[in-house]
Image (cartoon, rainbow, N blue to C red):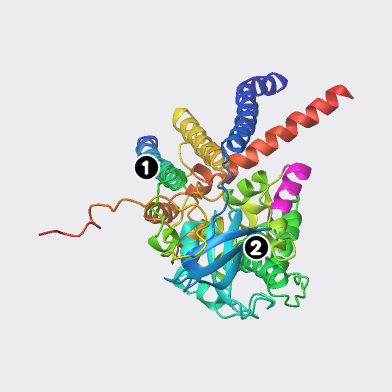
Amino acid sequence: MLKEPRRKYMDIVFVTIISICLVLMLGYQVVNVMALQKEATPTPTPRPFATAYQGIPEVGEETFRPTPTPEVSPTPSETPFLE
Amino acid sequence: MAVRSKDKAKKQRPYDYWDRVFAGIALVIIAAAWIVGGILQRQEAPECQLSVFEEATECRPIGNDMYEAVRVEENGTETVVGWGSFGEATGYGGPLQVFVGVKPDGQLAGVKVIKNKETQTYFRRLEQDAFFEQFQGMAANASFQLDADVDAVTRATVSSQAVADAAQEASYRVAERQLDMAVTREVEPIKFGTPEIVLIALYVAGYIGHRRGFKYKKHFRWATMIVGLVVLGFMYNQPLTIGIINSFMLGFWPNWRTNIYWYLLLGGIFFVVTAQSKNPYCSWFCPFGACQEVLGAIGGARYMGPKAGRGREVLKWTQRGLALTAIVLALIFRNPGATSYEIFGNLFAFNGAPLQWVVLGIILVLSLFVRRPWCNYLCPLDPTVDIINSSRRWITRGIRSVS
């Protein structure tokens, strides 16, 4: 059996360690849930050029095609550098 | 003597009362989270996955869950390069959806997972082990059996099985409807092997050992713990987690023919806890519990934490709060594994998040001096079993008072 003062000291140390673990585990849950939410939020993704490209209609070719999607304006990084 | 026992009963009443209150409130919160999660759930229409087909420039729906991938030349002519469809199966964490592309010659162009609720550290194993690449070039009407046509990834077999099942569903649809290929749907063989046999044996041993007056209780318990540690832990990494209980509540039940272990583990706990109000799993063969006891025996662990008073109460209630948070968040986000914070995978499969590694280290060191620190102060299963037990007591008392 532990002596009373030593036991009290042990209690404090033990409760502190377990509390740290509890906070870490709660943090783990929050991080995971935030990642889930981030994943669930729809972000507009530009359609690839190939999907939007409808081909050049030739003279006399039937022009019926599915409605083309509006061209996505290039992001700054994609804009060619003009001198 | 009679007065003393009356005083004792009076002292115990508040504890029992708050336990019951907790169980009641917890059940209400869990039910509310389940409903809220159902309302918030979004049903998004799946989109054709162009990236599965190497040469395709367009992919469009052609009805009946079928998509057509075409290559459009510069002059506008179109060539069909394949067809695709979606398949779904239940994995470790819930529904898993894949898109499968099939080329006109009947070979698979590729398999892509669209949605999954698997534990991400395990799911990454499938990507790292080139699991998905092995589907390329496979016949669309192949059997898709694990370890025959498809090699499962070790320690991620449930996820591997789910991907194979979902891919089979989608591939067979394309094979039958677009390619007129003969498809034979083989009945999945029932998977019953070493882990299932060992689990049943451990439940029986736990049941026998729990009985009062059993002569070799101590030795028997050590034997079951070591078997649990080695077989259920290090060999198969299949301990009970809160993720499994969440999956059960969300209705994400895996195929029973290939997941008998899942049903045995969960069914065994519910049956024994409700019928006998005892929990043989935790004290008799939980692999992580056994690991802590082994370390405790080495280090001579005697300390049990604060004996009574505020410290112990605070720790008990924070453990319950943590477990309840894990259940509620899983139900709201419809993702059983996301909040499963156990550190078992780190120890038995060397797989887990950095925060879990930190906690594992602390717990293993602490186990040398304290008896089962994880089980007594952090594990979510203990409070969950408490809720089941309190509910059971409530119901039986209600039935008795009516009759």
Q: Please provide the residue range marked out in magenta.
A: B265-277
Q: Give the amino acid type for the residue marked by disc 2 in the picture.
A: Thr
The verdict on residue B324 being magenta is no
The local secondary structure at tag 2 comes to: helix
Q: How many marks?
A: 2
Figure quadrant of the C terminus of chain B: top right
Q: Which residue is mark 1?
A: A20
Q: Is residue B35 left or right of residue B78?
A: right
Q: Quadrant of residue B219?
A: bottom right
In the rendered structure, which amino acid carries the disc numbered 1?
A: Ile
Where does the image place residue B232, in percent across and percent down from the top left? 61, 64
**Marks 1 and 2 close (CB-CB < 8 Å):** no
A64 is higher (above) or lower (below) than A39: below
Please tell me if label 1 and label 2 are on a single chain: no
Q: Is residue B269 magenta?
A: yes
Residue A48 visible in the shown view: yes
Q: What whole-number distance in Å separates the C-alpha atoms at marks 1 and 2?
A: 32 Å
In the depicted structure, whether residue B221 falls above or below residue B321: below
Disc nearest the viewer among 1 and 2 = 1
Query: Which quadrant of the view contains residue B152?
Result: bottom right
Point out residue B27 in the picture as x, y percentages from the top left corner: 64, 31
Indicate which disc residue B224 carries: 2
In front of the other: B190 or B356: B190
Asked whether A11 or B128 is in front, the reply is B128
Residue positioned most to the left = A83
Q: Main secondary structure of the magenta part?
A: helix
Is any part of residue B239 visible from this angle? no
The x, y position of residue B344, in whole percent, is: 51, 57
- Quadrant location of the N terminus of chain B in the rendered image: top right
B245 versus B145 height, above or below: above
Residue toward you, A35 or B112 = B112
